[in-house]
Image (cartoon, rainbow, N blue to C red):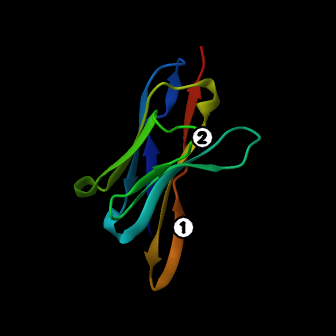
Amino acid sequence: QVQLVESGGGLVQPGGSLRLSCAASRSIFSFDVMGWYRQAPGKQRELVAAITSGGSTDSADSVKGRFTISRDNAKNMVYLQMNSLKPEDTAVYYCHARGDESGVKNMNYWGKGTLVTVSS
């Protein structure tokens, strides 16, 4: 089964930086899109940034210019570089992938999340 495992979360002060990593159990070329979502306490889960199998990227307006999504196909890894962190970035960050499995199309896969806390 497909597994996504996040790492890199932690406590950081406002203005600081953090890099999140997502390790996939199969080639990330098999996913048409991968991305990072986050869920803050009491809020809906929201898309932070995404990257397609073709390398196109997009990100939420709230993080543009601060967060960058990237991938390393050889390592089956996706990253989220977070700079200039703000308290409102505090959330559990989830790795997500969409692809096919066992003939079923558009399967959604989720990691278990990694907590990012931005506080002074």
| 77 left or right, relative to 107 | left
Q: Can residue 52 be seen? A: yes
Residue lying furthest top = 120
What amino acid does circle 1 point to?
Answer: Asn
Residue 27: which numbered mark, if any? Answer: none
Q: Residue at x 45, y 56 (%)?
A: 4
Residue lying furthest bottom = 103
Q: Quadrant of the N terminus?
A: bottom left
Q: Tag 1, which secondary structure?
A: strand
Q: Quadrant of the C terminus?
A: top right
Q: Can residue 26 be seen? A: no
Residue 92: which numbered mark, if any? Answer: 2
- Of mark 2 and mark 1, the one earlier in the sequence is 2
Circle 1 packing at 10 Å, graded few (<14), some (14-19), many (20+), is some
Q: How many angstroms separate mark 2 from mark 1 (CA)? A: 18 Å
Q: Position of residue 117 (x, y in %)?
A: 58, 27
Query: Is 35 situated above or below 65?
Result: below
Q: Tag 2, which secondary structure?
A: strand
Circle 2 packing at 10 Å, graded few (<14), some (14-19), many (20+), is some
In-front residue for pair 19/70: 70
Q: Position of residue 78 (x, y in %)?
A: 37, 50
Residue 108: which numbered mark, if any? Answer: 1
What amino acid does circle 2 point to?
Answer: Val
Q: Residue at x 26, y 57 (%)?
A: 73
Q: Position of residue 81 (x, y in %)?
A: 40, 36
Q: Quadrant of residue 29?
A: bottom left
